[in-house]
Amino acid sequence: MSICFTNARLIDPETGTQEIGSLTVADGHIVENGPAREMINCGGKCLAPGIIDIGVKVCEPGERHKESYRSAGLAAAAGGVTTMVTRPDTTPAIDSPEVLEFVRRRANEVAPVNVLVMAALTKGREGREMTEIGFLQDAGAVAFTDCDHVVRDTKVYSRALTYARSLNALVIAHVQEPTLSSGAAVTSGKFASLRGLPGVSPMAERMGLDRDIALIEMTGVRYHVDQITTARALPALERAKANGLDITAGVSIHHLTLNELDVADYRTFFKVKPPLRSEDDRLAVIDALANGTIDLISSMHTPQDEESKRLPFEEAASGAVAMETLLPAAMRLVHNGYLDLPTLWRALSLAPAKRLGLPAGRLSIGAPADLVLFDPDTPFVLDRFKLHSKSKNTPFDGARMQGRVDATYVAGRQVFSR
């Protein structure tokens, strides 16, 4: 079935343009404009490539009460996310072809959006012995990561990176010096001291990145930093890119739109990993995203149930659900004048697609018809109990937001409509 979207504000991150026009899809792909069986008048609303979200936690297997592939897929569709790239920090960890095949089969059965699966870099994410990277690649793993479990043994890590390089596998890392970061609940500083909370210096991120950059230079591995959140880490990242290392970096939407003061009176829904940073760090990271030093934005969607969040701040679990709030939260960057829409969509869609070698993230002829139709200006107050995720741990509960998804299409098929 062919569909022609007319009177749309086309957001094209590849050309860096936004203009009123029409777009035709047929057989799951974008095609030359021409006759179509269905016409959709977009009324001047924005039509953009679907969001590709690297770093989504789906708690299946092991903790389906927090999030399943069905509920995560519905949340993704409602948030304009057409491809979610899931993390291996499940119970058990996705560290064998058998577990990976189960997860892929389950996701394809119940999720209305595309699902790509990452596998663990070391067995059990314990940092002691590398996984069978080749077999996991054959089973469909698109990248390898131990998530927030930093590999402490540099010799084990270097061997894993060398092996990954031999297979041209992408490694995604969480850069925090693990000893300094252990037990931290917030970023160190005056606010942490006033609240009596254990903090971690922003230098822990810089130190972790410095070690990994040396290993990238030694091994030549394809490497992506899941989150850069501090100004102190940016010069090292800039130098690594200037020196030609195969390195990219992301940042979570929470570190772009919130700061350490949002924790306020021990509000555990604002406890994330790494912890929220200073306002100076937030602004520096936004600038790095605008100039391309930081490549992409992710939700770092991490469902936690009420029992693990309704605890004293130090004991509460880290993480927040974010796929449905990703687009309206990101629109804060546009409405505040930090980014324009094509630059934002470069980070939300085009850059993740390029890093993973996907044809999506574009509005060019032949690209997959994975699309999001949204109104960038619609105001609303977020009610966490209306989210599609099983868990409701969002820091944006009750927040006034602007920008809302009207419809989401995967391969030209509508998977969400408001």
Image (cartoon, rainbow, N blue to C red):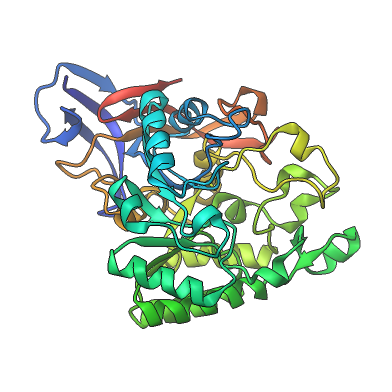
Tell me residue 348's x, y (percent).
Answer: 41, 49
Tell me residue 173's x, y (percent).
Answer: 50, 63
- Residue 383 seen: no
Q: Residue at x 90, y 60 (%)?
A: 196
Q: Residue at x 34, y 25 (%)?
A: 43
| Image-based side of 371 in relation to 416, left or right | left
Q: Residue at x 73, y 64 (%)?
A: 182
- Residue 364 seen: yes
Q: How many marks?
A: 0
| Image-based side of 310 in relation to 244, left or right | right
Which quarter of the image is occupied by the N terminus? Answer: top left
| Image-based side of 209 in relation to 294, left or right | right
| Image-based side of 202 in relation to 194, left or right | left
| Position above or below: 185 against 89 | below
In the picture, residue 398 is in which quadrant? top right
Tell me residue 95's x, y (percent).
Answer: 46, 50
Q: Residue at x 68, y 62 (%)?
A: 277
Tell me residue 337's x, y (percent).
Answer: 51, 54
Q: Observer-nearest residue: 148 or 28? A: 148
Q: Observer-nearest residue: 352 or 156? A: 156
In the picture, residue 19 is in which quadrant? top left
| Position above or below: 288 against 123 | below
| Position above or below: 54 against 281 | above
